[in-house]
Image (cartoon, grey):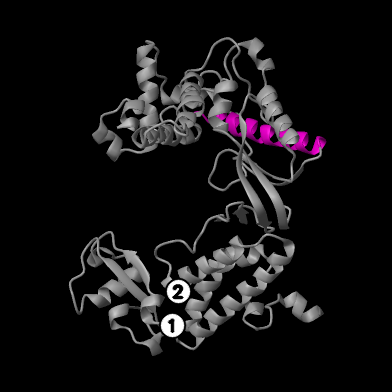
Amino acid sequence: MIIARIGRMPIDDIARMGVSQWIRSLLYYEHRQRNALIPKREELERRSEGVSSDAVIKDKKYRGGLVIDPKEGIHFDVVVMDFASLYPSIIKVRNISYETVRCSHEECKKNTIPQTNHWACTKRNGLTAIIIGSLRDLRVTYYKSLSKKETLTEEQRQQYTVVSQALKVILNASYGVMGAEIFPLYFLPAAEATTAIGRFTILETIKKCEAIGIEVLYGDTDSLFIKKPTDEQIHTVIEQAKKEHGVDLEIDKVYRYCVLSNRKKNYLGVTKAGTVDVKGLTGKKSHTPPFIRKLFYELLDVLSKVQTVADFERAKKDITDKIAICAKKVETKEIPLQDLTFNVMISKAPSEYVKTVPQHIRAAKLLESIREVKKGDKISYVKILNKPGVKPVEMAKKEEIDSKKYMEFMESTLDQITSSMDLDFQTMLGKPKQTGLDEFFWS
């Protein structure tokens, strides 16, 4: 209901169309309210012709957010600072819109956008900047803080939270649509300008941190991981971000300790309350076999109790032992069949899969020999040694289980925890560490 109101669309259209259509509807409504012409696609394309772009991601026409290389290792007392609604804030503050970026006024060309050859208009406010800026202000300064108010009833709190979340969905997609070719108001320079200012803002904030003696451990698009900052240092950085860039920087999380691997977007953090955050959790997913999911949560439990560096070393030993015991059970086929199942719901009847037949469908086709299988059924299957490589759990026997496949899945699932702790899976199992050919020949 809230999204229907924001997007100015009937609720049945909201239900069957994606977020870019909601934003299109909102922008078109505002154009008509102002008696403004909605530009044609080719008019916008003409204005962005011959503009160079240095995209670094395959299949993307412009550069995205900035990711700073993590400082590998275990770090205690880590504060995660977050830019509140970074891209919507930039759109608002820097007047980013299809009609204001690379406007026709000669004098506006001085208002350059860092790291690009674009500029933004200084004579009039862009429609996107007004609308997205207003929604951003509504969310950040009104609904978000309202939903945390102590005096609210539970019903009021839920309502304000829902409004805040609905605004967040639209705001998060608002910059992306400008750089998506399917969007009728697609204007590449506007999307490029937004991410360029985002990269510039985070780099300048890192410089400020380092200038006042804060160690920056990692940065990802709109957040910074900083080590042992004082309250005064945090206050200084927040003030600078507001004054110089017009964006709100706030404390998102405080980690008792954080483990950073050498890979970007792959870290593990434990909050003061003992909650464990692992970036991109595979182990939590519902289709993961129960024995791996159980082990995954046991490992998180071990990590949640770590208070010091000495505790961390003990935790590494506990984790190694738990993984080794579980792996032994996999190899000796001691784990009950029910705990080895992958559980996947089928979205259409097995007969409808012709070109590519996924594993769960292969299992479903075998299952059809003993019972009817239809769209929406949950298929529980296990991995077996012989063809077709999978079997419904109802038809499988323990001795058929492909232990090697389960070991591989276990390794890839737990890798997020083990790699960030510098633990090698093969070594934990008491096997020699796999090395490259060069090391083999030269050592």
| Front residue (pair 267, 269) | 269
Q: Position of residue 52 (x, y in %)?
A: 63, 32
Q: Secondary structure at mark 1?
A: loop
Say whether residue 319 is visible: yes
Q: Mark 2 Cα within 10 Å, few/some/many (few <14, many 20+)? A: some
Magenta stretch encompasses residue 33: no
The quarter of the displayed image where residue 219 is located:
top right
**Which residue corresponds to mark 1?**
335
Quadrant of the drawing holding the C terminus: bottom right
Q: Position of residue 430 (x, y in %)?
A: 65, 83
Magenta stretch encompasses residue 206: yes
Horizontal side of residue 151 vs 117, given as left or right: left
The quarter of the displayed image where residue 64 is located:
top right
Q: Residue at x 55, y 22 (%)?
A: 92
Asked if labels 1 and 2 touch by Cβ distance under 8 angstroms, the answer is yes
Q: Which residues are magenta?
A: 187-212
| Front residue (pair 306, 322) | 306
> Looking at the picture, which amino acid does disc 1 mark?
Ile
| Front residue (pair 138, 347) | 138
**Which residue corresponds to mark 2?**
291
Quadrant of the drawing holding the N terminus: top left
Say whether residue 388 is visible: no
Above or below: residue 164 compared with residue 310: above
Q: Earlier in the sequence, mark 2 or mark 1?
A: 2
Q: Name the outermost residue toward the front.
A: 151
Q: Secondary structure at mark 2?
A: helix
Q: Position of residue 130 (x, y in %)?
A: 49, 18
Q: Residue at x 39, y 14 (%)?
A: 37
Please tell me whether the stretch drawn in magenta is mainly helix, strand or loop. helix
> Looking at the picture, which amino acid does disc 2 mark?
Phe
